[in-house]
């Protein structure tokens, strides 16, 4: 085990409630589509899980469409809305989206004749309402969809989703939000947000990997990405993973129930981490909104360092974190999120994310501060060499 696990935004350890719920179902076979008693029992588990998730997130049970995770849910929303609204061709997405939204959008541009437009963000990574409004009003009748994430996975900035969704609806345009990072960290109400589609996934909220959901408002029907049995509202096909769904529901229910208390605890721990890192390494730059950010997110740029080198030095000392940079053919690429926020390439490559979750304690912060200054010094020397 690491001395300090500071990568909860990538995957957070499963909650005991999720482990218990999933384990109980793993003991029992069955296909929720079967008509016999065993199949009906599994179907009951699925439908009760659907109700649990809907209740926790301010949705109707019929609006919960189970998927294999956030990536599939994002693809279903982006591609499905685009296909269902042809011949409209404009796809509006923020410049700081996760690749699970950006890549299908760009694929639509390359292969399906879409016009993909990246909405600019400010220095904190926020999409301003007037930016979205101006983009739509250039040609509202040709906009197929808008997709803007609820909270950024790298820098933690929280977007004004209900305001942005309302602007899209003023023009009758479907609005999707990737809320993978937001659920369990900030209050999330599907109905209250005004979104037509919302993505969540299990392993960000203390549930299992490989299961998620797309919340789809009534009357919204994207064209399916997967075709087959049509198990989920005829927009998503595939045999349902009842054990994983039970674990997802338990995790969502627990995370949402404890969200306010967890946010207070993690927010205090986050602020302490920020203060101590600034003291230990003068000159670091905090990225993201200083106020409207996820309670467990801290994202720093370390001038003079390569982020991947610093990450590996910390890892050798038992501190696990992440860098937003992508690696292609062994060469670190600067974070598209930081570049969109106005950072230069060097700063974008020299950044690390420390993310806290339900298992985080002050001991994790202590360990980071204990090893960080020496790691930064060594990374800077390596960069000069």
Image: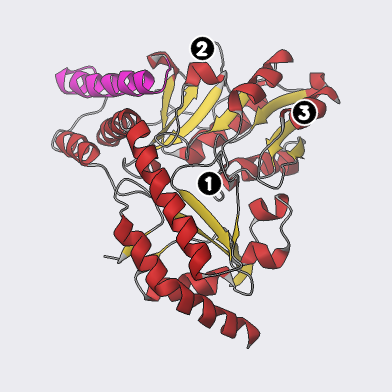
Q: Nearer the viewer, mark 2 or mark 1?
A: 1
Q: Where is 148 relative to 64, above or below?
A: below
For marks 2 and 1, give the CA distance.
28 Å
Query: In which image quadrant can residue 266 be found?
Result: top left
Farthest residue in the bottom direction? 385
Kindly identify which numbered label has been placed on residue 218.
2
Quarter in which the N terminus is drawn: bottom left
Kindly identify which numbered label has been placed on residue 153.
1
Is 252 placed left or right of 339 in the picture? Answer: left
Asked if residue 55 lies in the magenta stretch, the reply is yes
Q: Which residues are magenta?
A: 35-59
Name the residue beneath numbered marker 3: 130
Q: In terms of depth relative to the viewer, which is nearer, 80 or 4?
A: 4
Query: In which image quadrant can residue 107 be found?
Result: top right
Are there few (<14), some (14-19), or many (20+) residues within 10 Å of tag 2? few
Q: Secondary structure at mark 3?
A: helix
Asked if disc 2 and disc 3 are in contact, CB closer than 8 Å, the reply is: no
Q: Nearer the viewer, mark 2 or mark 3?
A: 3
Asked if disc 2 and disc 1 are in contact, CB closer than 8 Å, the reply is: no
Please tell me how many numbered marks the rendered image carries: 3
Please name the residue shown 55% across and 34% down the image.
150
Is 385 placed left or right of 353 in the picture? Answer: right
For marks 2 and 3, give the CA distance.
28 Å
Asked if residue 380 lies in the magenta stretch, the reply is no
């Amino acid at each position: 085990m690491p001395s300090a696990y500071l990568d909860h935004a990538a995957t957070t350890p499963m909650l005991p409630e999720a482990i218990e719920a999933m384990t109980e179902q793993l003991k029992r076979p069955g296909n929720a589509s079967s008509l016999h008693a065993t199949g009906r029992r599994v179907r009951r588990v699925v439908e009760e899980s659907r109700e649990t998730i809907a209740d926790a997130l301010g949705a109707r049970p019929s609006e919960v469409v189970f998927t294999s995770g956030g990536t599939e849910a994002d693809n279903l929303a982006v591609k499905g809305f685009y296909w269902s609204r042809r011949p409209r061709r404009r796809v509006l997405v923020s410049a700081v989206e996760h690749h699970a939204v950006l890549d299908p959008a760009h694929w639509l541009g390359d292969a399906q004749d879409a016009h993909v437009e990246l909405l600019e963000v400010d220095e904190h990574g926020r999409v301003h309402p007037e930016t979205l409004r101006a983009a739509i009003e250039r040609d509202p009748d040709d906009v197929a969809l808008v997709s803007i994430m609820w909270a950024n996975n790298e820098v933690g900035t929280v977007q004004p989703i209900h305001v942005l969704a309302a602007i899209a609806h003023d023009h009758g345009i479907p609005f999707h939000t990737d809320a993978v990072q937001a659920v369990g960290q900030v209050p999330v109400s599907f109905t209250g947000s005004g979104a037509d589609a919302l993505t969540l996934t299990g392993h960000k909220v203390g549930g299992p990997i490989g299961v998620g959901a797309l919340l789809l408002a009534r009357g919204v029907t994207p064209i399916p990405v997967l075709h087959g049995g049509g198990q989920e509202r005829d927009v998503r096909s595939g045999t349902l993973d009842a054990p994983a769904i039970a674990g997802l529901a338990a995790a969502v229910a627990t995370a949402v129930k404890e969200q306010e208390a967890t946010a207070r605890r993690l927010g205090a721990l986050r602020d302490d981490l920020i203060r101590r890192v600034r003291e230990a390494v003068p000159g670091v730059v905090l990225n993201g909104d200083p106020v409207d950010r996820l309670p467990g997110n801290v994202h720093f740029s370390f001038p003079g360092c390569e982020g991947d080198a610093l990450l590996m030095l910390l890892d050798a000392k038992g501190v696990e974190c992440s860098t937003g940079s992508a690696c292609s053919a062994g060469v670190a690429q600067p974070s598209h999120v930081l570049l969109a926020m106005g950072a230069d390439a060097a700063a974008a490559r020299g950044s690390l994310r420390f993310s806290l979750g339900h298992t985080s304690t002050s001991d994790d912060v202590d360990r980071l501060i204990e090893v960080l200054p020496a790691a930064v010094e060594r990374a800077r020397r390596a960069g000069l060499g």
